[in-house]
Every structure is written in structure tokens, then in C-alpha cells.
Image: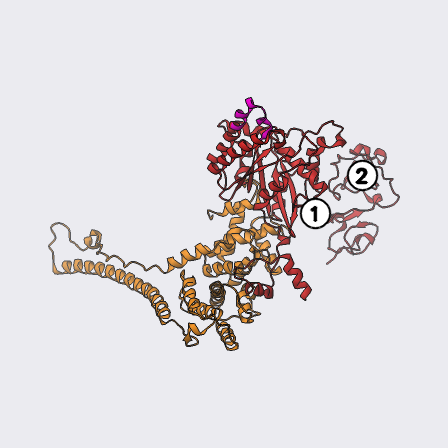
Chain colours: A red, B orange
Amino acid sequence: MTAAPPEDFAGICSLPECLAGSGGACRLGHEPIECDNFRPAPDQHPVEDEPGSAVPAESATPSAEPAPADVQATPATPAAPASKGAGAAERGFESRVPTPEGPREMVQLGEPAIAVHSADALSDAEVRDLMARTPVSVVVIAGPPWAGKTTLLATLYQEFIRAPIGAWSFAGSRSLLGFAVRAYWSDSASGASSPTTVRTNYDLTRPWLHLRLGRDGGLFDVVIADVSGEHFGPFRGGGPLGPVEPYFRRADHVVHLLDAALLKERRDRGRALTASQGLLRRFGESDMFAEGTKHTMVISKVDACDPEVVDSAEEQANGWLARWFPGSAVVRVAARPRTDEPPYGLEELLDAIMSVSRPTASQVVKPSLSRVGRRLFSRRTVLHPLTSEDHEEEGGAA
Amino acid sequence: MHEMFPDWLRTLSPDDTLTQLPVAEWWAAVESMVAEATPDDIIDLTRAACGRPTPEFDMSWRGHLREHHEMSPLRGQERQIAVLAGTAVIHASESGSHRGLASYARRCARHAGWQPELRDVELTDADIAASGTDVRHLPEWPTPRRSPIAASTYAASIPGDGVPVTGDVLKAVLESLASAAADAAQRTARQVVKAAAQREERLIEQADVLSWLLAGRCADLECDWESLSPEGAATMAAAAVLDLTYFDIGRPDAASLIGQAVDAASSAQDSVDELADRQSVLDSHGFAVDGHLADLQVTCAAVYGGQSADADSIDIGIRIHDELFLQREFTGASS
């Protein structure tokens, strides 16, 4: 049974094909005054201040603005004054839309709100959302303050703007703004006379930078935690790792940084090496890493130091890794050389980082029956997933 | 909760704490799914775990998750859905009534080149070998039970102080003692019979396998292995080993047995007759090119299609064995 409004009770119903607004029967069978989709015409609203008022006075105000309940992200409005001339300004915002004559247009957002990414660095929750959709490798960079952790990330961004890094192509990022912010002070647009990187905040609200990289037809997602070096000071001294520890426990790949700039002066060299060794030892002797976690030692700023000294440091670093993280490699990186040379070592670093990555689900090639059969009988190896070339061939054959 | 469940979920979080994930609700969903799963559900869970669910099952699985956690997505977040399906299929292969089916579905998915979102889904070899050894372990004979006659058994029949012991009293005491002894003997006998049956089942399988192995020939075709090509021998041996398997988990030495046949085979190319024989043996084991499990039986399909082989024949044999085993478990569980 459907309910029809009284003949003298007009209004607008936002429900498609409902006749309640034109005096017909409500499609849902509701009394129009009780139906959430029905809005009475303005001249039929009782005013809140008046005795017997049933509808908020704000609804009675003719306005181009949608009712607050109908539009998400509308500022909360206090109870509006009864007078028509009070205007939108008194409700907390200024309307630039002229008030139309006649009944209001109703705005109804039936679908849930769609999140628009800010492109800033990602929070934990945003990374979780990403991980629910696609395989993502988690990389954490460890090293003392000013070792070059953030500079490394900023340079990756700047280099990808120009061209692929080795075999790795930039294929997207949810945190482009986060990268841009980190790279800003090394860009000429900043007006700075020499490139620099702003110190990373201790705060961990948005520590993650996301990269989607392409290689050999596959796409690989990685999130890299850009955490302040201050977190590692107490840890190296025997204290807890603090709020970043859960990231290390989860990490697929940990990059340990050794700042070669500190090796330049003989008097600082021993202390710098001891500090790096101490941090690595603390990590190595802890039980925080999962069995499959990979480790890479990066000697950063290698352009700032004599090659012989770097060779010696690399030899020592290899010894530390062999002891605490066997099978790990040392990579030399100059993310921001002081000469006019381009950055180097980034490709090796990406190769190491991405070695634990899997292609995104959309890129996992689905083998067809006939193709698998041919692959199975064509070589003396176990089955492998088909490659994109196989699919192209398949499509071409078809 | 499965001890590995939180570990499996780590793949969905950038940190180790998992405090933001509904771990308990998801586990309840997985457990109830496995408890009520049909054979079709197990196969569909395997497909879903590898990111290729059927639309119907996808809806159903998401709806099931939503019942246990109201924020579970009804669309999107495919990887999360696949990881949870992976945990369910692993749990199903360790408990529940379809252990063998789930184990071999995982294995066949790997043979087909499917990539599960949860890597543990494809790690089945050790589990199957351990389960296969476990179910074939000869049970110990039960220790003969001594009659546990407690004083309470006959206390009621013994007269009190000053009451003469009559024949009726003695009879009642003896009857209670005899009854308790008979009961204990009966229980022991039952246990012995049960153990004997279990041992017989295992020994029969073992004896059959030994006689097949010592015969050194293909019983189905009544010919020597030497007269078959390696692929033909692998197919026939896989089917034979399957026929000799009486449990819901395959023999841990299946690869070795198939290898014996393949090693004895000639290097000659297979003939048209051999292809017909292979098709025949696959048919007889329930394989159908367009069957319900066809996407999980890619090796059988290739062999059935007569594709010439330059692959490791033992590997082919193992895959055929696994795919036919899946067929057998599925058919048995569905009927």
C-alpha cells in the first residue's frame, strides 16, 4: 500500500520515479512528511521558532545550498535563525551562489564518499589499504641522523623525473607530494644556493613513501619508511628502538646506512665506523627480523671520501654483514655528488631493494591450459608462470 | 587460533603489531568456513587464494567475511580477500574433513603456475610428506589391560561385621569380580582388533606397493616398463601408485616409485597406441578435459592432448599423480 500526500502538500522527492513530489503516491509507501527523501516546498515549512514547529527552521530557508544532511563534508551548521535574511554567513560559511527563485534543488549523494589521496607521504592506515589491494614490499632505512636517508629518497624521485634508473621505470606513486617535499630544497625552484635536505621529523604520522616501479613488463610496489635518524641513537646505546620497532619487525628489506662523509677525516673515521658497527650489531643480535628479511648496507656520500678509505670501509662492512646478516651486500651510493656528476649507485640499490618484490596482482600472467602444456613439454625444467611475451604470442596466434 | 594466523596477516600490514586488523573476527570467519566447507568450497578457496575466484564464490566468501566483520569489503581489496582465502585453505589442509583435498588442491595450483597471495599456500611438500608418513605409521599394540577391580566393585556385596558369609554373598562378590574382569578383557580385545585392522590396512598397502615394485612392469598394460617411453611410463606409474594408495594423503615415496618406472623406460618416442593408453588410464581415473577441476589439472590435459615431451618425466609423473589424486579426493568427498 502506498501513501499519497495531501493535495495541498507539495514538495520534492529525491527518489527517482517517485511521484510524491508531484502529489502522487510515495514509491516507498511512506507518509511524505516522514520520508527522508521528501522535502516539502519552502512555503510549507513551519518555522522552528513558531509554536508547533516540526521541521528545523534552516530547512525552511530558501537557498541554493544543499541541506547539510545531504552533502558530505559540509561544515556543521548551528541552528539557523528563523529569519530568511540571516544568510549563510551566520551558518558558518559564505555562499557565493545566488539564491535561486522557487523550490530548492536537492543534492543527494547516494554513494559513499570516495577518498581522494592527498599524495602526501602515507600513514600506516593508507599503506594497509594499499596492501589490501596489491603486493607491496616494505623497506625500512636505518642510519644515524644526517646519514642521507631522506636524500636518497629525494634523489630517487628526482632521477625518476628525468629518466628510468637502469632497468627500473617509474610507474606511479601515491606519495608524489611527499617525494616533492623532500626534494624541494635541492631544487632550484626553492631559491636555495646549494642543495640540501630538510631533517626528517621525529613524528611517525606519515612515514611511508610509495613507489610503483616497472621492469620487464611487471609492476612492483614498494613502500619505504622515511624515519628520523634520532630513533636509532638510543637503540645503538642499548636502549629500545621505540615506535619504529614494529616497522623493522615487519620489514621485507632493511637498508643500513654508513655515512662515508664521516670517514673523510681521520679523527672521525674510527668513531663513525664504530657507530655504524654498533647499530648493525644491535640489529644483528636482536631477534626482531623475520626469517625472510633481506639486508643491504649502503655506503652513502661515497663522493665525499677517498676511494681507498671507502674500499677499506666496504671491506669492514662486508665483515659485519657476514657475521650478522650473511648473504647481504654492500652498495656504494652517491645520491647527490658534489661534482657535476649524476648520482650513482641508485640502480644497484633498487636492484637490491626490489629483489624481494613480487609483481602486482594485475600483472601476474595467468597461464592458459594449452600454453602450460607447451611450456611443460618444451624444456627440462619445472613449470614457470607465463611471461607477457607468452601472452602476446598466444594472442598473436589466436 | 592457528599459531601462524597472525604471521600470515603480517603481509597485510606495514607494521608488526596488527592491532588495526580484526584478527579475531577474521579467524572466526576462517574457522567457520573450514568447518562447513564442501569439496567445491575447498577448490573455490584455492582458486580465490590465487587471485582467481569464481564470481559466485567471490560474492559468497566476501559475504561470509562480512558476517564476522562488518567492515569487510564487498568489493575491491582483492589481495586481502585472497590472503584470507589462503589462510582458510591452509587451515583446511591441516584440520577438518577435507585435509587431503585441500593439500592436493594447493599442490595442483602450484603445478598450474598459480601464484597465491599468501606464499605459504604453495609450500605443501613438507606437510604432505609428514602427513603421509604419519598416517602410515604402524600403530603400537595396546598394552594388555589389568583388571581394574576397585573395592567399590564388590564392597556392596560384602556383609557387615557379625553377619555370616553365606553362599549368596560369595556368589554376588564373585559375580561382580567376574563382570569387571570381563569388561576389562572386552575393552582390551576391542583395542587389539582396532590396532590389528589399522596395521593390516597399512601393511596391505605396503605389500601391494612392494609387489608392484618388484614386478617391474606396467600392470595396466601388461608390459615391461622398458617398452614404454619415459612419458608413458610416468603416466602409467603415476596412475598405478595412485591405485595403490589407500589413504587420503599420498605416499611420501610416490616420486621415488614413479622414478623407478621412468628409469626403466626406453628412450623411444611414444607411439599412437601409447597415447591412446594414456588417455584411457586418465579417463579411468576420472579426468575430463572440460571437467570441474580442469584448470587445476593442466599436466593431465597436456598429456591427454598428446603433446610431445622433452621435460623431466619424473616431474610429469608426480604432477599427474597429484592431479589424479585431487580428482579422486574430490569425487570421493562429493559423493
Region in magenta: A259-273
**Secondary structure category for the residue under label 2:** loop
**Secondary structure category for the residue under label 1:** loop
Q: Is residue B145 magenta?
A: no
- Is disc 1 surrounded by few (<14), some (14 to 19) or many (20+) residues within 10 Å? few
Q: Do the residues under discs 2 and 1 have CB atoms within 8 angstroms?
A: no
Let me know if residue A291 appears in the view: yes
What amino acid is found at the position of numbered circle 2 in the picture? Val
N-term-proximal mark, 2 vs 1: 2
Q: In which quadrant of the rendered view does residue B307 lie?
A: bottom right
- Residue bearing mark 2: A47
Closer to the camera, B189 or A151?
Answer: A151
- Residue bearing mark 1: A112
**Image coords of residue A330 (percent x, y):** 55, 38
**Image coords of residue A236 (percent x, y):** 51, 28
Q: Is residue A261 magenta?
A: yes
